[in-house]
Amino acid sequence: MQLLRAGLTLALGAGLGAAAESWWRQRADARATPGLLSRLPVLPVAAAWGSPLTTSVPASLTEAPLSCQVPHLNQNAWNNLEKYSRSLTRTYQNVYVCTGPLFLPRTEADGKSYVKYQVIGKNHVAVPTHFFKVLILEAAGGQIELRSYVMPNAPVDEAIPLEHFLVPIESIERASGLLFVPNILARAGSLKAITAGSK
């Protein structure tokens, strides 16, 4: 089962990687921005390391779709969320993870909402304002639980508990254009969504 999950994750990452390969090669200037931003791979190395697919991981990371992420976030709070996600594999039969960038609006002094984000390099590579992570957890009895997180692409105090970043899945669906709930319900028939303050 673990091999199947790792294979699915790598296949999804490789499929996205093929689509983004030329995009990333054309944006070498984004990679060369020293100290400003880290790159967030769709498949964290730690998620597949130690599996029989490990030999393909380094090559897949060179072609994987990457997003610019503030190093402090990547090395601290986001890393804690990734470790927590991996720890759930000890509790649940299946753990599916979907991660991506978001470009969210914020209200300015004039009372209007704007989507503003930084671009870097001569090709104006967009830097996401936030990142999301959706965890679809399947218990041995088939019960499905969903946890969805959004973190700003900015330094985040590690003392803030991960539960603070739990959001309703609908907010991620609306901002990303991805639909999780209808597809899960079509397969499972029921779903328990975990949001801030619920258990």
Image (tube, grey):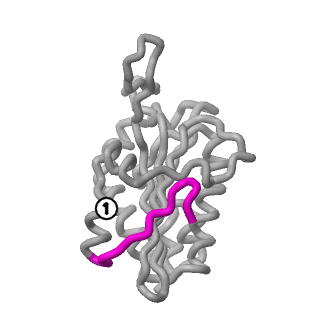
Instruction: Out of 197 and 181, give the one closest to the viewer.
Output: 197
At a point 41% along the width and 24% down the height, the residue shown is 116
Instruction: Find disc 1 in the rendering and name its residue.
Output: 15
The stretch drawn in magenta includes residue 98 = no
Residue 195 magenta: yes
Q: Residue at x 66, y 56 (%)?
A: 80
Residue nearest the observer in this picture, 37 or 77: 77
Relative image position of residue 191 (x, y in whole percent): 38, 71
Left of 18 or right of it: where is 67?
A: right
Is disc 1 placed on a helix, strand or loop? helix
The spot of residue 23 in percent (x, y) is 33, 42
Q: Label the magenta part by its dominant secondary structure.
A: loop
Taking the image as shown, residue 178 lies to the left or right of residue 159, namely left
Q: Tell which of 126 and 85 is nearer to you.
A: 85
Q: Is residue 180 above or below residue 140?
A: above
* Location of residue 123 (image quadrant): top left
For the C terminus, which image quadrant? bottom right
The image shows residue 167 at horizontal and vertical percentages of 48, 50
Q: Is residue 75 above or below residue 9?
A: above
Q: Is residue 144 above or below residue 93?
A: above
Query: Can residue 59 be seen here?
Result: no
Taking the spot 56% from the left edge, 48% from the top edge, the residue there is: 165
Task: Magenta stretch: give its range.
Answer: 187-199
**Amino acid type, residue under disc 1 in the picture:** Gly
Q: Residue furthest right?
A: 159
x, y percent for residue 73: 62, 43
